[in-house]
Each structure stands twice: as structure tokens, then as C-alpha cells.
Amino acid sequence: MSDPLPVPTAANGGIFRSPHIAAFLAIFFIGINFVIVRALYEQYPPSVLSLWRWGGAAVLLLCFTWRGVIAEWPMIRRNFWIYALMAFLMPVSGALVSFVAMEWTVAVNGAIIQSLIPALVILIAWMVRLERIGGRQAVGIILALIGVFGIVAQADWRILASFDFNFGDLILLGSAFALAGYTVMYKCIDEKPAPAVFLTVLCGLGGIFHLPFLFYELAIGIPMPFNLETSLAILYVAVFPSLIAILLFNYGIDRLGPGRAAAYHYFLAPVTAAAAFLFIGEKLLWYHGVGTILIFAGVFLASGTRRLN
């Protein structure tokens, strides 16, 4: 059965025929997502906003993909636990964790730390023998890690010595590892349903995994107001950083490979920083700039990996 959603292909002649454009737009939508979550964290629970992101996307997708889900159910059932692990890595360990981190840190830190993902993808791909790492790549990964830890420590050696890091930044670092693991795993799995069907399964499982957090928020009586601002935010997170961004990014992984697709995280920091400055008044400090340069230089050096035959 053909895919019921207009999935990007190289032959359809649309703007998304380029995997490079697709990967960039995916990162752009995710960057704006950081700013929205940071702007609303005092008004609306980030964990519930993340539930809207994945559960809402699943409901929207099912309107178009339910026939495809039924047709490809045997494949989904065979690989259920693999897809469940991927849903845990992306919607929960990657996305939900980064949403929660916005309660303790700023949107700019979230974007810069996730700029480490390309280097982590290369490291994980090497660990599973998908790519080779030479001396240049090893230096690049170390340089990128130094940049991240410089930002997390706010360039203060006393913070490094005492391990008194910002809790939100540490959460973001764990989130980056999870997203890098998802990127490599997506490329490695042997059986994948049509892209829109796979995304439906990923979002649906992600929404289910979020339910305990919703029940907790309801039990402790956290307010969840619905006004124009929160409603627009819910609409955005349910459509752009989940449904559209992941569809585009998975297409980029398929066409470019995990390492080259992940390199588009280069753009996450400038996109988020510009949006955070314009809309919520965040400031860039000098160690953000130095750390970003180190991360970009490190990822540039690390990007020269070669596939194993």
C-alpha cells in the first residue's frame, strides 16, 4: 500500500526532495520548540506539553495512516520491542527529558548542548562498528566534549572541581546521548514500515510512555491552563517538532546516513539563540560563544568518518 502522507522523495519534485533541506528544516523546527518550552515552563507543565507533542501528533497521523498501520501490522508486531526502544530514546529520553530540563536551564544551553549530537552519533556508530574513527575524529570528539563541559560549567573551574553543575544542563547532556543513539539505531534496523506509518508508531508509543507523567501532574494538582498562548504552543509542538521534523529528519538519515544527517545540528544553536533573543530576551554570554566554536570545530573534525565495508 502506498504511503498516505506526502513523504519526501527524491523524485517528487517538491522542495523537500533535497535531504539537506529536509534535515535543516527539521533542526529549525526543533530549535523553535526549545524557545516555546522555555517561554511557557512557568505556565504549563513541560512534561504534559511533551505529551501533547507526541500524543497529538499520533492522533493527527492516524487520520491518514490507519490503513497503512493495519497493512503493516505484521512487521510492526515483529519489531515491536525495537520500535519501543526507539520510542523511549526519542520521545522520552530525548524530547521529554529536554522539555523538563528547560525548568532549570535556558533555551540557548539546550540548543548548544544538543549541537554535540553529531559527534556522539559518530562515537556510537564506531562503537557498533558502523563507522571508523581515526585520530582526527577522536580529537574532534574530545574537542566537542570540552566545549560542552565548558558551557555546562559556565567556564568556571570551581564548578568543574566541585561537580556543582546545573542540573538542567546535565539532563540535556543525557538527552543528547539518547537522540544520538536513536539516529544510529534508525539507520541500523533492518525492517521499517513506510515513513509515515513508522512515525505514527513512534509518536503513539511515545504518547503512551508519557501517560505516567500526566497522571502525576493531575495527582498533585498542577494547573494546565488553556489560553491563546498555550493553545498555539500545543498546536505547534504537536505538528512541527514531532510530526514534520521527525519525518524530515528520518528522510535525511536514510539519504545522507546518520553522521551527515546529524551534522545539521550545527544549525540548532544559531537558530535557537536568535529566536530566544528575539522572543524571550535571552542573552548569549562569552562562554556560550567559545563553547559553540569548540563544539563546531570538534564536530567538523569528527565528521570525516568512513563507513566499514
Image (tube, grey):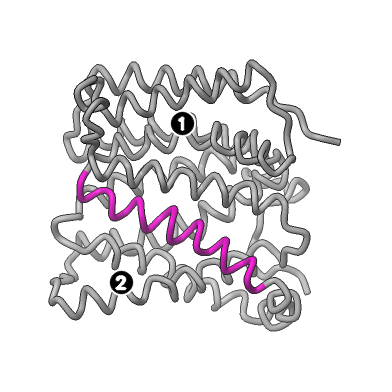
Where are the magenta residues, as a range?
80-104
Residue located at (30% from left, 27% from top): 151
- Is residue 91 magenta-colored? yes
Q: Spatial distance from mark 2 to mark 1, Cα to Cα?
A: 31 Å
Residue located at (78% from left, 33% from top): 307
Q: Main secondary structure of the magenta part?
A: helix
Residue 47 point in image, percent of width and height: 29, 64
Residue 144 point in image, percent of width and height: 47, 24
* Disc number for residue 267: 1
Towards the viewer: 119 or 238: 119
User: Which residue is denoted by mark 2 in the rendering?
Assistant: 213
Amino acid carrying mark 2 in the image? Phe
Determine whether, in the image, residue 293 is placed left or right of residue 12: left
- The answer to the question of whether label 2 and label 1 lie on touching residues, with beta carbons closer than 8 A, is no
- Is residue 184 magenta-colored? no
Residue located at (43% from left, 66% from top): 54
Residue located at (27% from left, 79% from top): 215
Residue 196 point in image, percent of width and height: 63, 65
Furthest residue toward right: 309
Towards the viewer: 153 or 113: 153
Determine whether, in the image, residue 263 is placed left or right of residue 208: right
